[in-house]
Image (cartoon, rainbow, N blue to C red):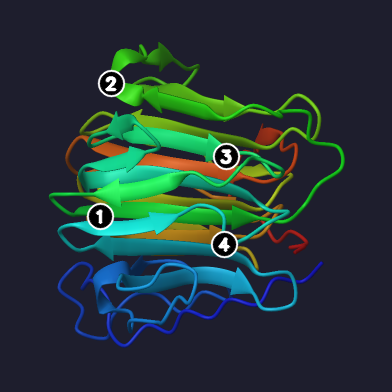
Amino acid sequence: MRIRVLAVVAAAAIFGGCASGPPDVPYPAFIQVDELSDIFMATLPGVRAKQLAGDAATRRTSNRIDLPRDWRGTSGGEPGRSMEIFVLKGELNVADIRLGPRGYAFLPAGSLGFNLTSSAGAQILYFLNDTDPESIIRSPIIIDSDLLRWAPTATSGVSVKELRFDPGNGSKTWLQRISAGASLPWEYSTALREGYLMSGDFRQSECVNGEALTGQYMAGGYFYRPAHSISGGPESMAISDSIWILRETELGVTISVLDCVAAEVTE
């Protein structure tokens, strides 16, 4: 299914002193979310929202949302779709459970509507997922990611925390920490992947038709990378300690490659 991305970037981070802006990539990458226009969300009244990606036909959507003080809402406005929430700043109560910064909630399709409240205000990531009959998670997941341990990976200086993995359809959400000076190899996932840079500064290369296009993300940066899109490489490096939140809505396998080569990109 082709996903239509609704985000439009007016300007982005300057890389390497070049005033021309970020590289021109054929999919959303090097986006700084603060520069996107606000949108209206009928199911979450009174919020300030920026849509990162979405599909009007299925109402699948990815958003960053600012909740004002003393905000009240509900998770029941989108029946039949699973919902993910990650708190970036402030606090959010899901029913009677308080989530502070780095708190995470997954509310599966079919869950009863939960009251959502924020007395002090919050900034959150808010994802609605298409209905997937292969998903087997039927109970809500509400966790404080600070209580999870970072697990090392095969790449030096890179560690992860798993927030959710559905063994039915393979969808997953996780945090990735990259230490300052660490780089990523050239690699691709067999599934579409999106990522939001929570903290740090990160230089990234996207391989497009065999050409490495390199730009810089600051905190609040976002990408929406189609399956089989190659990224990484020797120029890809954490300028400072960086933490990403990453998502794939179907089973994806990460495959390393030796260099930036032309590859078929699917959506």
Mark 3 or 1, nearer chain start? 3
Tell me what residue is drawn at x 68 percent, y 53 percent.
Answer: 81
Picture quadrant where residue 94 is located: top left
Mark 2 or 4, nearer chain start? 4
Mark 2 or 3, nearer chain start? 3
In this rendering, position of residue 66 left or right of residue 188? left
Residue 208: mark in rendering: none
Name the one closer to the observer, 196 or 134. 134
**How far apart are the alpha carbons under marks 2 and 3?**
20 Å
Residue 77: mark in rendering: 4
Q: Nearer the viewer, mark 4 or mark 3?
A: 4
**Residue marked by disc 1:** 123
**Quadrant into which the N terminus falls:** bottom right
Residue 204 seen anywhere in this rendered image of the structure = no
Residue 146: mark in rendering: 2
Q: Nearer the viewer, mark 4 or mark 1?
A: 4
Figure disc tally: 4
Tell me what residue is drawn at x 75 percent, y 37 percent.
Answer: 251
Mark 4 or 3, nearer chain start? 4
Q: Residues within 10 Å of mark 3 (few under 14, many from 20)?
A: many
User: What amino acid type is highlighted by mark number 4?
Assistant: Gly
User: What amino acid type is highlighted by mark number 2?
Assistant: Asp
Mark 4 or 1, nearer chain start? 4
